[in-house]
Image: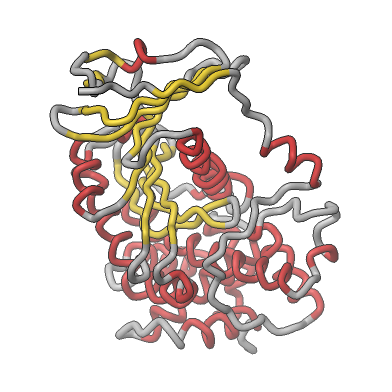
């Protein structure tokens, strides 16, 4: 039986960068990624129509796919890292915003990922799934993910790590300082802050009135970590903002940390429902889920590049009805792929992404202006204490 076009084209491109010891592993990865892209699903049952060229029964396909997901030879270093290195060639020496976050699956498994903010969204650098029934994890549990992400970064990058208050860990901050990474981490309200004046107060005591922002340079937290604090309270928002940062505090502190929301949360939503629908996958094994997420990440990178190529060649409006780009590059890439399959056209060559991050998707210029100007403060106070 003739090999499916997408599987063949992906395999030809992947083999330029992926060099496993056993070429059957590359065939399996290429087949699975092609099936994910065409089915739009992380559920193995939904891949079966795109694997019919093998002439196997559904049971045989399941056995082979489950082996692929748990095979220690099918790992990030062999398959995901080379593709990522190819697509990030232009990022050497660039400023890179990374997000660190977790997501709970079925109240039994915890996904931990480090992602790169790009194009108003994010994509994975490193991830792992642990059998852990809480979204709060210890530093030792996610340190391997950070270290893996560190090895995948292009040379001479200037990194800023963005993380929620669940990662308010002294070990994490010290690790970032050792790597010479900048960082912005949301603080818990009960965290003790030693001000430059020598007075110690909790974050809750340092929150400003509504529509105001307080900036506290040169504070100390967690015994001996020197950093900066910015707090703000907005009307119609239930929780105040308190952001710890390695960089001097300013209103840009909130803007920088706010990139986390546009980056990681839509990315997790793409996993769960917007793109690949991992919830009905029926996998209940941490190793298999880690392997599945790696395949989803490869598929995401392929679609992301396709979406960018579509925009660059001026063909976005053939698939996106908004006046400006209203769809993420991932969604555009998935639509573009289906268009190519329908027309019987070849898959374009996957090219490196530009280091200059495109603006986030926004359906119109008026909406973009509204988003860019939606937060205003009546007063901003900087607390400077002389010795």
Question: If the image is split into quadrants, where does the N terminus sit?
Answer: bottom right
Where, by quadrant of the figure, is residue 347 drawn?
Answer: bottom right
The spot of residue 101 in percent (x, y) is: 40, 42
Q: Is residue 134 visible?
A: no
Quarter of the figure with residue 103: top left
x and y, in percent, of residue 304 in the image: 60, 64
Residue appearing at x 35%, y 10% in the figure: 205
The x and y percentages for residue 132 are 29, 37
Give the camera-side residue of 110 and 166: 166
| Image label count | 0
Q: Nearer the viewer, residue 314 or 44?
A: 314
**Residue at 39% over, 32% down:** 107
Q: Which residue sits furthest left?
A: 223
Q: Is residue 7 left or right of residue 109?
A: right
Q: Left or right of 250: which side holds 223?
A: left
- In the image, residue 38 sits, relative to residue 348, either above or below, namely above
Task: Please say whether residue 165 is visible from this viewpoint.
Answer: yes
Q: Please state the horizontal and vertical placement of residue 239, each as a whole percent of the image.
A: 49, 18
Please report the residue visible at 21 percent of the width from the left and 28 percent of the height from the top.
Answer: 220
**Which residue is rendered at x = 56% and y = 70% of the image?**
354
Residue sticking out furthest to the front: 386
Q: Quadrant of residue 78?
A: bottom left
Residue 52 vertical placement versus 383 (above, below): below
Name the residue nearer the viewer: 72 or 356: 356
């Amino acid at each position: 039986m003739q090999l499916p076009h997408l599987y063949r084209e992906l395999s030809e491109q992947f083999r330029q960068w992926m060099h496993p010891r056993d070429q059957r592993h590359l065939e399996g990865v290429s087949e699975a990624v092609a099936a994910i892209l065409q089915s739009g699903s992380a559920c193995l049952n939904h891949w079966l129509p795109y694997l019919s060229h093998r002439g196997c029964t559904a049971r045989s396909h399941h056995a082979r796919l489950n082996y692929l997901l748990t095979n220690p030879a099918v790992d990030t270093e062999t398959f995901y890292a080379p593709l990522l290195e190819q697509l990030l060639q232009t990022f050497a020496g660039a400023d890179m915003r990374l997000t660190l976050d977790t997501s709970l699956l079925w109240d039994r498994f915890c996904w931990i990922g480090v992602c790169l903010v790009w194009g108003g969204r994010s994509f994975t650098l490193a991830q792992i799934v642990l059998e852990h029934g809480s979204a709060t994890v210890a530093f030792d549990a996610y340190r391997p993910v950070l270290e893996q992400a560190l090895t995948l970064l292009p040379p001479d990058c200037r990194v800023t790590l963005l993380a929620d208050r669940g990662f308010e860990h002294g070990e994490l901050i010290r690790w970032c300082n050792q790597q010479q990474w900048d960082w912005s981490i949301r603080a818990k309200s009960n965290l003790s802050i030693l001000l430059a004046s020598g007075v110690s107060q909790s974050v809750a005591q340092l929150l400003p009135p509504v529509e105001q922002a307080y900036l506290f340079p040169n504070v100390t937290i967690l015994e001996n970590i020197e950093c900066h604090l910015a707090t703000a309270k907005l009307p119609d928002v239930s929780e105040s903002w308190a952001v710890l940062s390695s960089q001097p505090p300013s209103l840009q502190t909130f803007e920088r940390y706010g990139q986390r929301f546009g980056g990681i949360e839509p990315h997790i939503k793409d996993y769960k429902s917007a793109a690949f629908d991992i919830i009905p996958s029926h996998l209940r094994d941490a190793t298999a889920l880690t392997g599945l997420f790696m395949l989803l990440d490869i598929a995401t990178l392929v679609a992301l590049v396709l979406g960018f190529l579509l925009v660059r060649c001026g063909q976005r409006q053939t698939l996106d009805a908004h006046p400006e780009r209203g769809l993420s590059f991932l969604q555009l890439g998935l639509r573009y792929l289906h268009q190519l399959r329908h027309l019987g056209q070849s898959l374009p060559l996957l090219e490196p992404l530009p280091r200059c991050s495109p603006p986030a998707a926004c359906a119109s210029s008026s909406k973009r202006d509204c988003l860019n100007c939606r937060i205003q403060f009546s007063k901003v106070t900087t607390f400077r204490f002389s010795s």
